[in-house]
Image (tube, grey):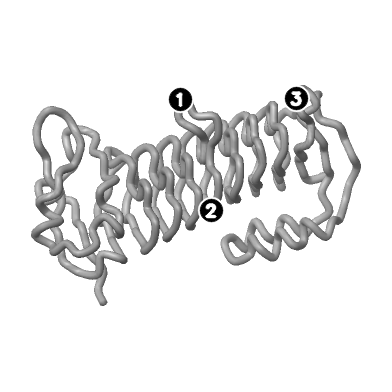
C-alpha cells in the first residue's frame, strides 16, 4: 500500500508538537479524521489539516514532506511502523521511541532520541546538542535502540547514555559521551574536547581522535580486540564507514577515574 503522506502547506508561525502523528496513534483513522487532529501550539487551535495536505494511505508508513525545524517531537513515543521526513525537524525528534524506524532526510534539533528505548533512527544531516541526552530533571538519557547520524552532532552527544548505540559519521562537539552510564557511542571523525567527561561505564570510540582528553583517563595501550570486530559486524548494517574505522587497532583509555572509572575510550593511535 501507499504511505500516508502529509505535505506542508506553509511554514507555521509557531512551533508545533507533532507527537500525535505516529503510526499506532493514527491506526484506524481515515485521512479526514487525521486532518481534524489537534496539534499543540499557542492559544489558537490548529489542526493537522491547517498545516498539512493529507493524502490517505497506510498509516504504518507515514511520510512528511517539506518539513521545517519548527516541527518538534516528530516520532515521539513511536512504537512501530515507519516515519520518513523530507526536510529539517525541530527538537526532541524520536523521543521515547520503543520501536519502528524514523528517517529524517535533513537536520535535527536538540535532544533527538532523548529517552529512546528501542527502534532505529537515521538522520542524514546534522543533529544538535544532547543527542540521546536527558531532559532537565531526568537521570538517564537514551536507553536502547540504534541512532545513526550521517553528519555532525553538537555538544554532549550521548549524555547519560544508559543503553543502545549511537553512531556519528561526522564530527562531535565537546564532551561527547559525558556522564555515560552504559551503551556505545561511535564517532568516525574528530571529537571536541573532553570526551567521556565523568563517564562511569560504557564505550566511546573516537576513530578520528579528539581535541583534548581529560587527564583522568588511563592509557592501556593499543589493542586489536575481538570485541571491536564484533562491534564492527553489528554496526556495518547501519554504517559501513563507521564499521571500517572499528577494524583498525585502537588505543584504549580507561576512565573516567574521577568517578566510577569503568568506562573506556578507544581512539586512533595516529
Q: Is residue 185 left or right of residue 268?
A: left
Residue at position x 51%, y 40% from top? 132
List x then y, in percent, for residue 127: 46, 42
The residue nearer to you, when weighing 150 against 5, is 5
Cα distance between the residues tagged 2 and 3: 26 Å
* Residue displayed at 55% across by 45% down: 143
Mark 2 → mark 1, Cα distance in angstroms: 21 Å
The spot of residue 124 in percent (x, y) is 45, 53
State the mark number for residue 145.
Answer: 2
Q: Residues within 10 Å of mark 3 (few under 14, many from 20)?
A: some
Left or right placement of residue 114 versus residue 270 in this view: left
Answer yes or no: do the residues labelled 2 and 1 have beta carbons within 8 Å?
no
Q: Is residue 255 left or right of residue 139?
A: right
Q: Residues within 10 Å of mark 1 (few under 14, many from 20)?
A: few
Q: Are marks 3 and 1 in contact (CB under 8 Å)?
A: no
Q: Is residue 107 visible?
A: no
Which residue matches tag 3? Answer: 259
Asked if 117 appears above or below 179 in the picture, the reply is below
Q: To which residue does mark 1 refer?
A: 136
- Residue 234 horizontal side relative to residue 47, left or right: right
Image position, residue 102 (x, y; %) = 40, 56
Q: Is residue 194 above or below residue 20?
A: above
Whether label 2 touches label 3, CB < 8 Å: no
Give the position of the N terminus as an image quadrant.
bottom left
User: Could you tell me how far apart the alpha carbons at marks 3 and 1 are, in whole angstroms?
Assistant: 21 Å
Which of the two discs, 2 and 3, labels the residue nearer the N terminus?
Answer: 2
Identify the residue at image location x=89%, y=39%. 220
Mark seen at residue 40: none
Q: Residues within 10 Å of mark 2 (few under 14, many from 20)?
A: many
Element type where label 1 sits in the image:
loop
* Tag 2 secondary structure: strand
Q: Earlier in the sequence, mark 3 or mark 1?
A: 1
Amino acid at each position: 500500500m501507499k504511505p500516508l503522506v502529509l505535505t506542508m502547506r506553509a511554514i507555521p508561525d509557531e512551533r508545533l508538537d507533532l507527537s500525535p502523528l505516529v503510526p499506532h496513534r493514527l491506526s484506524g483513522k481515515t485521512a479526514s479524521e487525521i486532518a481534524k487532529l489537534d496539534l499543540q501550539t499557542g492559544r489558537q487551535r490548529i489542526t493537522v489539516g491547517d498545516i498539512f495536505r493529507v493524502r490517505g494511505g497506510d498509516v504504518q508508513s507515514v511520510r512528511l514532506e517539506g518539513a521545517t525545524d519548527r516541527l518538534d517531537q516528530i516520532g515521539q513515543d513511536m512504537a512501530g511502523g515507519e516515519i520518513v521526513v523530507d526536510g529539517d525537524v525541530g527538537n526532541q525528534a524520536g523521543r521515547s521511541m520503543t520501536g519502528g524506524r524514523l528517517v529524517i532526510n535533513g537536520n535535527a534539533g536538540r535532544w533527538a532520541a532523548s529517552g529512546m528505548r528501542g527502534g532505529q533512527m537515521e538522520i542524514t544531516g546534522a543533529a544538535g546538542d544532547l543527542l540521546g541526552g536527558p531532559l532537565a530533571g531526568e537521570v538517564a538519557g537514551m536507553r536502547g535502540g540504534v541512532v545513526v547520524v550521517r553528519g555532525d552532532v553538537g555538544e554532549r552527544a550521548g549524555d547519560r547514555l544508559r543503553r543502545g548505540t549511537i553512531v556519528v559519521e561526522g564530527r562531535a562537539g565537546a564532551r561527547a559521551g559525558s556522564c555515560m552510564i552504559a551503551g556505545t557511542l561511535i564517532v568516525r571523525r574528530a571529537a571536541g574536547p573532553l570526551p567521556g567527561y565523568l563517564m562511569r561505564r560504557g564505550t566511546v570510540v573516537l576513530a578520528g581522535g579528539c581535541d583534548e582528553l581529560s587527564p583522568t583517563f588511563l592509557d592501556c595501550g593499543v589493542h586489536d580486540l575481538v570485541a571491536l570486530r564484533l562491534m564492527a559486524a553489528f554496526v556495518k548494517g547501519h554504517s559501513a564507514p563507521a564499521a571500517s574505522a572499528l577494524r583498525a587497532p585502537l588505543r584504549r583509555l580507561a576512565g573516567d577515574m574521577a568517578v566510577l572509572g569503568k568506562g573506556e575510550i578507544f581512539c586512533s593511535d595516529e
